[in-house]
């Protein structure tokens, strides 16, 4: 009884002391250093796979903070290590790429940067329209706090600066560059995303799946070309493609449990060249989303079954049935380790207050490539969101004013100050809580 009382008393005294000290330290570092760094990154976004200057600057910042830095991991990726005695190896990841979007936020530091798009070869505007500038600025803030607090933790801290998240290429590329072989396999892995749909500064953490799994699927439909006036001489791939598109709608509506989310979107349907020609091919492009492997299997096997059998319905021979091609660039759902999420929730509530931590499920089925770091081999991980939109902006929207811009919009803007501060604080609290073993 007495021992328990002493323990509780110690916790009650120690936690607010850390919280106040950390809060003040992060505030000072934001005002004196991180605000300007964020401004630099916001004005100078770079596109996926060609984040050369961003990576260089991150490598320099993390080196200056006292970390051992390795560049060019999986392309432009950066790995920064800080060893601090025996203890767990904990990884924190920040993605650094911008998007080919012309910024129209109206902000004083709006990006006017342009870059050669590595996909098209065209010169395009670039913008941090997803808020990855918040992630990398916070990572630098975290590095500076953790280096200054070496007496408060044990183990090895691994900070990853990841390229090409927007094209879901970067995590795989870093992992394929023998990431764990070269730097060690982490005992825990962490990451966060700033979110325009959460109130600035709050931590939104789920014990389930904050991001969906995504597959890219192509369906090639072989028809038999003919004159548009003689349909009986051909097999019309546009009619067959239309039947496939409509039949695919039954997968989510009729084959998944209504409590089990999934998406099958046909984003592109291309066929034909002229009014009076029946084409001999149609091409459908799909994105398919899930929150579990079971759902993924139902959707992908259903797409194949529907496409092939609709081909049979149209009377196509077995060697001309529609081909379903699933890209190997799929990502699994981002699934938090529930126990670890609960543990961090408690640490965050204790350090930052109960009001700072929420669990509001996401409405969309966006995907992330972070799970490629933690799925195989499995590493306990938590991925959380940091709110980036001031409460007043939600109130204005509710009152009929301009809507809060979404991620990837040219109008996208998050408030860097509360977002970066909460990003650093939540990461440092999580690391300190995990690195006591
Ligand atoms: Zn994005
Ligand atoms: Zn993003």
Image (cartoon, helix red, strand yellow):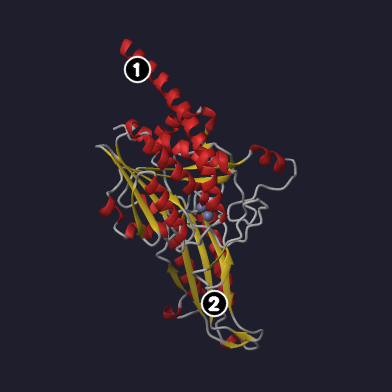
Residue 91: percent from the left, percent from the top?
A: 35, 45
Q: Are marks 1 and 2 in contact (CB under 8 Å)?
A: no
Q: Residue 78 lies in what quarter of the image?
A: bottom left
Q: Is residue 353 left or right of residue 404?
A: left
Q: Residue at x 39, y 32 (%)?
A: 343
Q: Within 8 Å: ligand 2 and the Cβ of disc 1?
A: no
Note whether 283 is above or below 193 in the view shown. below
The local crowd at label 2, few if under 14, some if 14 to 19, many if 20 or more residues have their Cα within 10 Å, is many
**Numbered disc 1: secondary structure:** helix
Q: Residue at x 50, y 30 (%)?
A: 24
| Image quadrant occupied by the C terminus | top left
| Residue 365 in view in this figure | no
| Residue 426 in view in this figure | yes
Residue 262: percent from the left, percent from the top?
A: 51, 53
Residue 114: percent from the left, percent from the top?
A: 57, 64
The local crowd at label 1, few if under 14, some if 14 to 19, many if 20 or more residues have their Cα within 10 Å, is few
- Mark 1 or 2, closer to the camera: 1
Say which of 359 and 296 sits in front.
359
- Distance from disc 1 to disc 2, alpha carbons, whole Å, reads 69 Å
* Extreme residue in the top direction: 2
Say which of 169 and 432 sits in front.
432
Say which of 352 and 288 sits in front.
352
Residue 252: percent from the left, percent from the top?
A: 53, 56
Note whether 29 is above or below 159 in the view shown. above
* Extreme residue in the right direction: 400
Q: Is residue 65 left or right of residue 138?
A: left
The residue tagged 1 is 7
Q: Is residue 279 left or right of residue 182?
A: right
**Numbered disc 2: secondary structure:** strand
| Image quadrant occupied by the N terminus | top left
Q: Residue 390 lies in what quarter of the image?
A: top right
The residue tagged 2 is 282
């Amino acid at each position: 009884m007495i021992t328990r009382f002493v323990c509780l008393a110690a916790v009650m005294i120690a936690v607010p002391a850390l919280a106040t000290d950390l809060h003040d330290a992060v505030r000072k570092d934001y005002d004196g250093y991180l605000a300007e760094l964020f401004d630099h990154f916001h004005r100078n976004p770079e596109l996926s796979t060609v984040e050369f200057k961003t990576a260089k600057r991150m490598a320099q910042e993390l080196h200056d903070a006292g970390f051992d830095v390795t560049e060019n991991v999986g392309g432009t990726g950066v790995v920064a290590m800080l060893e601090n005695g025996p203890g767990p190896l904990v990884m924190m990841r920040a993605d650094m790429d911008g998007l080919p979007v012309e910024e129209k936020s109206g902000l004083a530091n709006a990006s006017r940067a342009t870059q050669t798009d590595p996909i098209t070869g065209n010169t395009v505007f670039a913008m941090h329209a997803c808020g990855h500038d918040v992630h990398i600025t916070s990572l630098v803030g975290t590095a500076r706090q953790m280096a200054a607090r070496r007496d408060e933790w044990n183990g090895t801290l691994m900070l990853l600066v990841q390229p090409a998240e927007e094209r879901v290429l970067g995590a795989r590329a870093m992992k394929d560059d023998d990431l764990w072989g070269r730097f060690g396999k982490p005992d825990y892995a962490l990451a966060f995303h700033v979110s325009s749909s959460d109130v600035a500064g709050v931590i939104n953490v789920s014990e389930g799946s904050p991001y969906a799994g995504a597959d890219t699927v192509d369906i090639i439909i072989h028809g038999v070309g003919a004159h548009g006036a003689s349909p009986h001489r051909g097999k019309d791939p546009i009619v067959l493609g239309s039947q496939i598109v409509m039949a695919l709608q039954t997968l989510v509506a009729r084959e998944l449990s209504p409590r089990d989310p999934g998406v099958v979107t046909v984003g592109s349907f291309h066929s034909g060249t002229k009014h009076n020609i029946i084409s001999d091919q149609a091409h459908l492009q799909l994105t398919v989303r899930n929150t579990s492997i079971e759902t993924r299997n139902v959707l992908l096997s259903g797409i194949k079954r529907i496409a092939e059998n609709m081909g049979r319905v149209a009377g196509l021979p077995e060697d001309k049935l529609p081909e379903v091609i699933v890209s190997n660039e799929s990502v699994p759902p981002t699934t938090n380790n529930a126990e670890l999420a609960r543990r961090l929730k408690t640490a965050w509530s204790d350090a930052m207050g109960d009001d700072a931590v929420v669990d509001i499920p996401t409405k969309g089925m966006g995907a992330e490539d972070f799970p490629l770091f933690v799925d195989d081999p499995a590493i306990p991980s938590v991925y959380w969101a940091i709110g980036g939109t001031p409460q007043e902006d939600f109130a204005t929207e509710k009152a009929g004013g301009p809507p809060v811009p979404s991620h990837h919009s040219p109008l996208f803007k998050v408030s860097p100050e509360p977002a970066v501060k909460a990003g650093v604080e939540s990461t440092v609290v999580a690391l300190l809580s995990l690195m006591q073993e």
